[in-house]
Image (tube, helix red, strand yellow):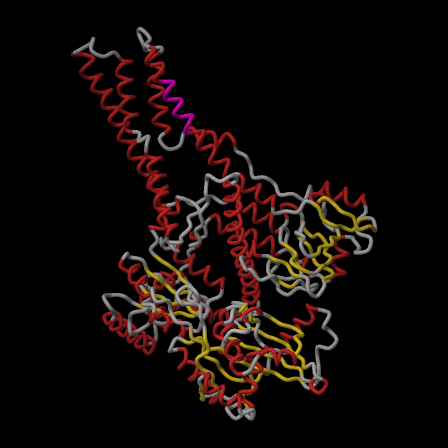
Amino acid sequence: MEIQIVDTRATGAAHDEAALRLERNMTIEYRTLSVQLSRHNQNQARYTEAENQPFAAKWKDWMYRKLHIHGAYTQRQAEYNEEQRKLEATAGELDSLKFHLDTVDQTLAKFGTSPIQGLEDAAITRRRERDGPNTLSSPPNRIFLKLFEWLFSGFCPLLWIAAIFVWISWKPLGRPSSPQYLALGIAILIVIFLQAGFSAYQEWTTSRVMSSITGMLPSETMAMRNGQLKKVVASELVQGDVVHVRGGDKVPADLRMIETTRDLCFDRSMLTGESDAIVATVDHTDENYLETRNIAVMGTHVTQGSGVGVVVATGDSTVMGRIAKMTASKKNERTLLQIEITRFVIVVAILSLCIGAILIIIWAAWLRKSFPTFLFLSDALVNSSGVIIAFVPEGLPICLTLTLTLIAKRMQRQNVLVKNLTTVETLGSVNVICSDKTGTLTQNRMSVVNAGFIDFSISPSDAKLRFDSATDVAMQRLYQTASLCNSATFDPTTLNLPTDERVVNGDATDSAILRFAENLRPVSTIHQNYCKLHEIPFNSKNKWMLSLRQGVAAESQSSLLLLVKGAPDVLLPRCTSIQDVDGQVHQLDKATIDRLQTLQRQWASCGQRVLMLCRREFTDNPFADIYDRPADMERAVAQYNSELTVVGLVGIEDPPRKEIPHVVDTCRQAGIRVFMVTGDFALTAAAIARQCHIITNDHVDTIEDIRAQALSQAPGAMVDMPSSVLAHTTAEKITLAVTSSACNDGIRSLVLSGSELVGLQNEHWDIICGYSEIVFARTTPEQKLLIVQQLRSRENYVA
């Protein structure tokens, strides 16, 4: 849970809070929309594939579902709420946009423009009249609905009832009219309008979100019009305008890039949450409109380089406009505190109205007859109004604000910053914590503790001895790959310090491998001998990094190396050969793969992150003619990222934080389940989870146990099953029963990999979400979002 604090006493605090809330919401909506668009494309592909299946295949698939899923895997379309339908509709709209798939000539022809001439004045006028200005529409005001909410929310209905009783007691029921009743009625109305004014002020601060969006957009830009490059007001841009951008600019509209320099990069962090800038291309890099690199999204920053793009969408039609509309129309979910306050208001209102009605009934049935001069009707109504008002806790808002503020101050002393006071109580209601591993549960101080070749492992100190002999070819290649396929660098001001004390610029994994290589030999020497032609950084989807290097010395200019490092299970399918400890290269067969995986599992079970280092050497240069075309270069490099040779493995240790086991035990005592959600290998994640006390059982369930439980719980699922299948399923049920009885006090543990989450039905998730200890390994960002959504949909409060 990301919590931030805003000092409401500071000038402009409301604006800062609105901007912060907007950026967080924009990031969530963009990522959710991107995932939804990818799913939309996949569903379309599956539908087309299913339609093209022969009848026999369809019949087989239907029989499979009839046998195994009948009664258990029913579709729950009711779970798709209004927000999901809006996401699907928006994803469908974005899926219809094919601007990124068109070639440059097709784009220019489609919009009737030219990079040299641009648009003419007549065309600009027609398109502006058709599409409107390049601005984001403000959300509907609905002032009358807001006035009604301000005047009739909370305890205001009780005050209105009391005010009406007092006013009619003054006139016409008052005989004679009492000025005290008039003063009391005015006082009640003042209280009502003061509360309405406070609500209006809060609404005004919230409405500044749209002004924060407007502040993200540039005021002017450079566009080609009538053959001249001129400065144009961004709000006057139309579809087909040819816009020139350079480093430091904000993108004024959605652009289809038609010209880019090699170093043109866009910062999409406000939308994606990822700090790394993306390299722009002319050709599309992804079928997903939100992920391709030849579309510059409105409001993003140009970090470096320059380029030319054609405006393909303006105003509300842009990605920013669509997300802003979704964010503005999205109903804010009520916190637990707000739900409890609403319940309290209802209970108090019912009690006060009931007692007020009882007093009127007592007066009408008894006092009016037995003591006719004791109370008149006006006096009885005022007394009932006084009882109703007495039930209203006027100090409740102040008490709640003070209490939550004190809690926020205590949390601030614990380095937890609170952005919204209502989240304080929600944080106290959290019953599931999904935590990343690296840097959160661990110290993020990684170091290489093992290096290996097939089934031979060696410590870093022994590797240094073998490397110094200068005859160990295997160690020379391992050093070469570790040094060159690395995005981390040493801080120049700390080069005089020992290797372990130097400051490294880069992520922890690259830093550990860089220190390992530096201890063998200074990496600056090998960097002087090789120039970098292309690099694909590590990301959570690919789970590998690639670097293309060429020798700079005259005798080594023909040496072209493609170096890759990443997860072994991801890179192994790309490999065809492997070197042994003596540097001899052998074909990669099943027996060798088994030995390599055994070594990986051995290290991973000790909590080490295992990376595979690979290389491919070219005798000729297939990239010579495409250095200046980044998109072609990236496609070519991806194509040649195969037939790799396994150089070796490295095992990286990242010890858990010392306080984490106690924190996890404390959370468990408070009724909070702590789950690990990481991109690491399953065995590594499970080992670290045991050290952190996230997993406490000796036996850990897998996806097979989940499927067996789902099948056993399906009513009628075993009817008409073959006897062999029924016997196997019964044996699984017995095994599960024995396993459950062996768990610690009914606590069950589960380890799942990201690939195993694909295709799970709601029945599977019902079982998964019931586990006390879970580790999700090898997960992508989309799968992490899916995990949180599934937990929340089952009435869990997730942090």
Dominant secondary structure (helix, strand or loop) of the stretch shown in magenta: helix
The vertical placement of 562 against 99, above or below, is below
Out of 397 and 698, give the one closest to the viewer.
397
In the rendering, at what x and y percent does residue 685 appear? 40, 71
In terms of image quadrants, where is residue 269?
A: bottom right
Relative to 322, is 428 on the left or the right?
A: left
Give how far across and how far down residue 444 sits, in percent. 44, 68
Residue 433 lies in what quarter of the image?
A: bottom left
Quadrant of residue 337 within the rendered picture: top left
Q: Does the segment drawn in magenta span residue 187?
A: yes
Magenta region: which residues?
185-195
Quadrant placement of the N terminus = bottom left
Q: Residue at coordinates 55% horizontally, 79% vertically from top-left?
A: 482
239 to 601, vertically: above or below: above
In the displayed orientation, state which residue is furthest to the top.
Answer: 176
| Above or below for 252 versus 37 | above
Which residue occupies the foreground of this view, 46 or 81? 81
In magenta segment, residue 744: no
At x 30% / y 77%, what residue is drawn?
Answer: 727
Q: Nearer the viewer, residue 665 or 181?
A: 665
Q: Residue 567: x, y in percent?
A: 50, 75
Q: Is residue 275 left or right of residue 591?
A: right
Quarter of the figure with the C terminus: bottom left
Task: Report the number of numbered marks.
Answer: 0
Residue shown at 31%/29% (left/top)? 392
Name the outermost residue toward the front. 496
Q: Position of residue 217 (x, y in %)?
A: 63, 47
Left/right of residue 530 with respect to residue 589 in the rendered view: right
